[in-house]
Image (spheres, rainbow, N blue to C red):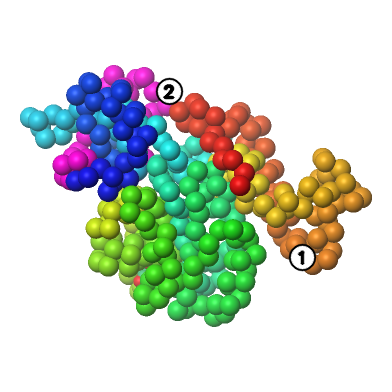
Amino acid sequence: MDLAMLGWAPSNSLEFDKDYAPLGYFPGRVVRKEKHLYFVLGSTGEERIVGVAGAFRHTVATTAEYPVGDWVAFEPDEVTGRGSIHAVLQRRSAFSRQAVAAAGKERKVEEQVLAANVDVVMIVSALDNARGFNVRRIERYLTLAWNSGARPVIVLNKADMAEDLDNALAEAAKIAGTTPVCAVSALRNVGIDALREHVRPGNTLVLLGSSGVGKSSLINCLAGEELMRVGDIRELDARGRHTTTWSELTVLPSGAVLIDTPGLRDVQLWANEASIEETFSEIISLSAECRFTDCRHGAEPGCAVQRAISEGSLDPCRLASYQTQIQEIRNQADVGRWMRNSDGRPARRRKRR
Ligand SMILES: Nc1nc2c(ncn2[C@@H]2O[C@H](COP(=O)(O)OP(=O)(O)OP(=O)(O)O)[C@@H](O)[C@H]2O)c(=O)[nH]1
Ligand SMILES: [Mg+2]
Ligand SMILES: [Zn+2]
C-alpha cells in the first residue's frame, strides 16, 4: 500500500528517513488501539499488532499513549508476527480536549488527544431533537478544532427529521464564521456530495460529536458500504447508546482517511486564547474599534462590541459565550497548567488568517 494513501506527508519522510530508517524500523499508522496494544497499518497494507518497547516507554514523560492517527516507528517481530513501537513521529496536528478527571482524584488538568494528524474535523450534530443541536456546544468544538491545527466543518445530520431546517441553518450560520456548514441526511443519503468536497485523497478526517448523532452512519455513507456498526434506532434514547466504543481509522478506496470516534459527553476546552479568538472572530474584529485597547466590552464608553449588540448586529449570547470560554481556560491555567501539551511542547498556535 502506498503510504500517501494513508496520509503520509513529505515531512514524515524527512523525519523517518533521517532518524528511524537507519535503525531498521518501519513506519505505521495507528488505526485502532485496545488497552496497551496498537493496531498499525503500514506499506504492507496488513494490520499488525504492536506493543510499546520498554525502553521507549520510559523515555516519554507521560504514559506512552498514541491516539488513532499517530505515525509510529516500529520494529517487526517476525517470530510472533507482532512488533514494538520505538518512537512516535512529530504530529502535524492533533485534536485534543481536556481529560476528564477521574472521580475522587485531585483535580488535574491534562490533555487528551483524541485523534492525531488530521486535516479536517467534522463536528457532527443531529437535528432530530433540540438537545442534539446546541450552538454553544458547537462553539466549544470549534475552539478545539482551531486549536488542533485542522480545519473544521460543521455537519448537521438527520435533516430529514428537522422541524425547522431553515431556522437551524440560520442559527448555525450565526456561529460558523468562515466554517462551512453542511445539512445532510445519512439515512436518506441527502447532501453527502457537499460533504465529499472535504474528503480529499491523502487527507485525514475525524468525525466528532455526541453519541447517536450519526457519525458512523456518515462514514458508511461516504464509504458507500457498511463499514461501521450503527446504533439500532429502537435502542436509541435521547442521549444515544455509545454504539462505537473505540476510535477507528478507515482508508477509503479514494485514498481519504476517516476516523470514527465514540460519542463524547464532555467537550472540556483544551485551547489557547488564540483558538478562542478564531471561534469568535467577529468579536475580535469589532474590538479593534473599541475606544480602549483593553476594553472588556462591559460598561466602558466607546465599546464597539456593545454598540453592535445594541444595533442588533451581534447576538449578546456570542459575547457571553466568548467570555465564558476565555474564563474557563484562565481557570485551568490557575490550577497549574500553562498551555502545554502532553509531550511538553507549548500548545500549537495557529496564525491568524
Ligand atoms: N432519521 C435519521 N436517522 C439517522 C440519520 N443518520 C443516522 N441515523 C440514525 O441514528 C442512529 C445513530 O446513528 P450512529 O451512526 O450509530 O450514531 P453515532 O454518532 O455513530 O453514535 P455513537 O457510535 O454512539 O457515538 C442510528 O439508528 C441511525 O440509523 C439520519 O440522517 N436521519
Ligand atoms: Mg458510532
Ligand atoms: Zn469593547
- Percent coordinates x, y for residue 114 in the rendering: 42, 44
Quadrant hosting ligand 1: bottom left
Q: Amino acid at mark 2?
A: Ala
- Percent coordinates x, y for residue 223 in the rendering: 29, 63
Q: Earlier in the sequence, mark 1 or mark 2?
A: 2
Q: Is residue 165 above or below residue 281?
A: below
Element under label 2?
A: loop
Q: Is residue 162 magenta?
A: no
Q: Nearer the viewer, residue 47 or 25?
A: 25
What residue is drawn where x is 39% and y is 23%?
Answer: 60
The mark closer to the camera, 1 or 2, is: 1
Q: Return the residue at label 2.
A: 61
- Percent coordinates x, y for residue 282 in the rendering: 70, 55
Element under label 1?
A: loop
- Percent coordinates x, y for residue 169 in the rendering: 58, 71
Gap between marks 1 and 2 measured at Cα: 48 Å
Badge 1: few (under 14), some or many (20 or more) residues near its Cα, within 10 Å? few
Q: Return the residue at label 1.
A: 313
Farthest right residue? Answer: 301
**Beta carbon of the mark 1 residue lies under 8 A of ligand 3:** no
What residue is drawn where x is 34% and y is 20%?
Answer: 58
Q: Quadrant of residue 87?
A: top left
Observer able to see residue 109: no
Q: Is residue 56 magenta?
A: yes
Report the magenta residues as a range: 39-68
Q: Amino acid at mark 1?
A: Ser
What residue is drawn where x is 49% and y is 67%?
Answer: 182
**Beta carbon of the mark 2 residue lies under 8 A of ligand 1:** no
